[in-house]
Image: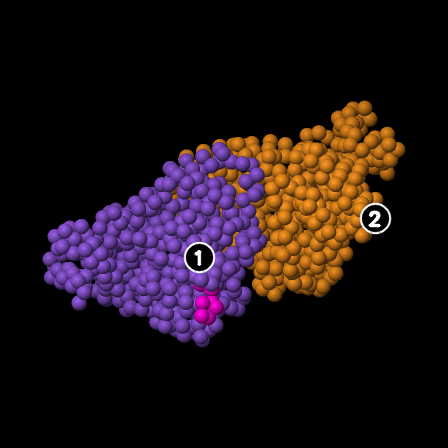
Chain colours: A purple, B orange
Amino acid sequence: MKLYESLAAEIEDLVAQGVLRPGERLPSVRAQQERRGVSPSTVFQAYYQLEARGVIVSRPRSGYFVAPRASPEPEVSRPDAASTAVDVSSLVFQVLDASRAPGNVPLGSAFPSPTLFPLEKLARSVSNSMRRIDPWSTVADLPPGNAELRRQIALRYQLDGAPVAADDIVITNGALEALNLCLQAVARPGDTVLVESPSFYAALQALERLDLKAVEVATHPREGIELGALAEALEQHRPKACWLMTSFQNPLGSLMPPEKKQALVALLAQHGVPLIEDDVYGELYFGAQRPALAKRYDADGLVMHCSSFSKCLAPGFRVGWAAPGRYARAVERLKLTTSLAAAMPSQLALADYLGQGGYERHLRQLRAALARQRDLMLEAIAAHFPAGTRVTRPQGGYFLWVELPQGCDALALHAQALERHISIAPGPMFSAKRDFGNCIRLNYGQVWDGAMEAALAELGRLACAMSG
Amino acid sequence: MKLYESLAAEIEDLVAQGVLRPGERLPSVRAQQERRGVSPSTVFQAYYQLEARGVIVSRPRSGYFVAPRASPEPEVSRPDAASTAVDVSSLVFQVLDASRAPGNVPLGSAFPSPTLFPLEKLARSVSNSMRRIDPWSTVADLPPGNAELRRQIALRYQLDGAPVAADDIVITNGALEALNLCLQAVARPGDTVLVESPSFYAALQALERLDLKAVEVATHPREGIELGALAEALEQHRPKACWLMTSFQNPLGSLMPPEKKQALVALLAQHGVPLIEDDVYGELYFGAQRPALAKRYDADGLVMHCSSFSKCLAPGFRVGWAAPGRYARAVERLKLTTSLAAAMPSQLALADYLGQGGYERHLRQLRAALARQRDLMLEAIAAHFPAGTRVTRPQGGYFLWVELPQGCDALALHAQALERHISIAPGPMFSAKRDFGNCIRLNYGQVWDGAMEAALAELGRLACAMSG
């Protein structure tokens, strides 16, 4: 047993014995190092191992904590291997319409609370950039988009170890448009696309709208899509693309470890299948560093990396982008014929904001707030939900995936919760086959308060009544 | 002969005899009325008739003028009746890329000069609205879009005699997205869509991208699509939609008279075929009042009216909309799954700007500038282009369609002009069949100056050399 393994085992014992209690802060790395006389890297390795096993959690700027008292994790999904024509839109719209009603506790929302965003600074950036505007920029910022904004984004790719030329970045009307354009660049009506199970409903809706078939692939709630199942699906279905969320998947919150991302890219390259990497939550990590991009391992230009500022900075600005590798020119042209260009005031304002250098500080605050809210919600679920409930423990993003005991019906729970002014996202939204009938997705991106606590307790009561 | 007809005939004689010279101002309606002792309506009717026949032109805020010395008009187009798979994108991109090079005289541009827009006032509206922003609006302005902006647009529909409920207006990322979503709401891959001949290249590109077939229908250079030819095409091709620019068509500048629009709507309703009415130039009229919308005659909810602020107020803001009649909910859902929402800073700023009431004054100035520039360009073409050149005399918008003598090759002219830093839009861009090989579209939306005059002279020399 290596030194870091014995240190990890020791701490795990303390947690099991109740010496270290849920939510309690662990000794700092420095304290371990000084008092135990081990190297910092030994402590880090021990803590990483414990974090990977769900024993402890990290919170940005605060350190490591014993994992909150939480229900066990869900199992790996086991979707049917057949391809499916998609028809989820009616259900999704029904849920979204209901969730938008003002006054509801928005646990079904797809966004974090806008009060977590630097709206005043963004407003100043909008005003600044409009005062300095060159009239011709209003017609010149056609695809691939504003040059300064693309330069700022390219700088971030370089820091993430996945260098992309500014000219190969296409600015879009949010990540959703980027993903849609990437899909259209590689798939024609009737083609098949592989997605996770459960998968983000907007991906399913995009497939539905473009007459594409979905194959849902088994997905681990902590480590993302199962590569064995993926390899089989590649052989069996000869898909035209694979659309995955590699970091903090919506709804699972799963994070593919770096070596798994590398293996994923290699596997897809073997089959010549492009990866549409939906990475809109990648910046919202709670660990020590940004999760690797699958794009980082892309030697063939087959990874089409898509992201946006909508989940971590400025939702209403509708600025996203694609870094589509060898498909950059095709995506640029599709952007031009689909909606010409992204809004110029939004592009200029974000370029100004990024240039001022406050983005990292904002992100650190946002990550810390989200991590805290995750733990509070996990505690509330453990306290109020029926025995047999399983829940994910994501290392980033702002969604929990809750598997209720058999007998609970997520759609019925959604209806009952709405009557009590609580919105949730029921599981069948996340499957072309309407699987996950006893699962729900909860948003912990809202600021935690008494109403939130009460809503969780109420949801728990409703679920308990259902599970008999 | 009625009184107004004899007055019109009199004036036409004066023009023919050279007593009234090209570009000369006609006596005002009041002067005619007072000195001739006829009613104002007699004078108006006479002037309208002369304007419809191309003898005189009106200029906003200036009155009526003898039509500039101009080449004759082109004939009605006679496209092949077969349907065509579309493949124009490569040519279009080649031309657009070349046209965007800085330093070129942008006669091939699709936009008027941005210096004609009220950029300072818009910048103030952006700042105002961002200062007052409600954080939740950043996630709440999902389709159909910002409520105040939709209310302002609904007010304008009411003034135009085509009342539309604010809730049936879907805000989009420019008119191009609105048109694309309308098309997707009614047509599936493989379906056929009727368009004008020549037609706007972006319409052809949208058909190409969505695997739709185009049937180009004969179009009159002054009065728009030929209803006889349209009726035949409806019988022969059973199209799923008809995509037309009813006012100041791009590239012809044709304006369907109101009774023709009414007959168009009735004809399409008979066949149950939706009309996608692309009306982005409708506000840029040079006559006394805004041309009627085909939407005005729509009793069945089959007219999907699309427009934007991009051509007449704020190009870079990328705010357009659709009023899709019975397809409103379908379009709203497509918007949600395609790109979620339009940019919130742009929507709020335009709602603020419209609420301040300066839009009409800006439009009057813009129309006057465009009308003046049209006449200057018509004069320049008459002076410099080869004998046998034909050119449209549009009553609005900012495009001239120039038919060069046989022997002139628009693509070769495009290439030669580019070497001289002049961009033009060659005719084959405007046809799925690459017709119009001797036609070009010129943009008179740029501020007229010496460089513009010199560019026209140079183009004329190149064309003369070709027609040899």
Closer to the camera in the image, B140 or A83 = A83
Front residue of A447/A66: it is A66
Residue B257 in sight from this viewpoint: no
Q: Amino acid at mark 2?
A: Gly
Q: Residues within 10 Å of mark 2 (few under 14, many from 20)?
A: few
Provide residue B150's location: percent of width, then percent of height: 51, 43
Q: Nearer the viewer, residue A212 or A326?
A: A326
In this picture, is B377 found above or below A233? above
Q: Where does label 1 land, which residue?
A: A305
Answer whether residue B317 is visible to the viewer in this image: yes
Q: Chain of mark 2?
A: B
Q: Position of residue B459 (x, y in %)?
A: 74, 43
x, y percentage for residue A156? 40, 49
Residue A341: mark in rendering = none
Q: Quadrant of residue B134?
A: top left
Residue bearing the label numbered 2: B468
Mark 1 lies on a secondary structure that is strand
Outermost residue on the right side: it is B17
Q: CA distance from mark 1 to mark 2?
A: 54 Å
Q: Looking at numbered disc 1 in the image, what kind of residue is underneath it?
A: His
Q: Residue at x 68, y 63 (%)?
A: B84
Q: Is residue A79 magenta?
A: no
- Looking at the image, residue B70 sits to the left or right of residue A279; the answer is right
Q: How many numbered discs, if any?
A: 2
User: Residue drawn at (72%, 43%), measured in percent from left and top?
Assistant: B400
Read off the magenta span. A269-277
- For label 1, the crowd category at 10 Å Cα-Cα, with few meaning under 14, some 14 to 19 and many 20 or more, is many
Secondary structure under tag 2 reads: loop
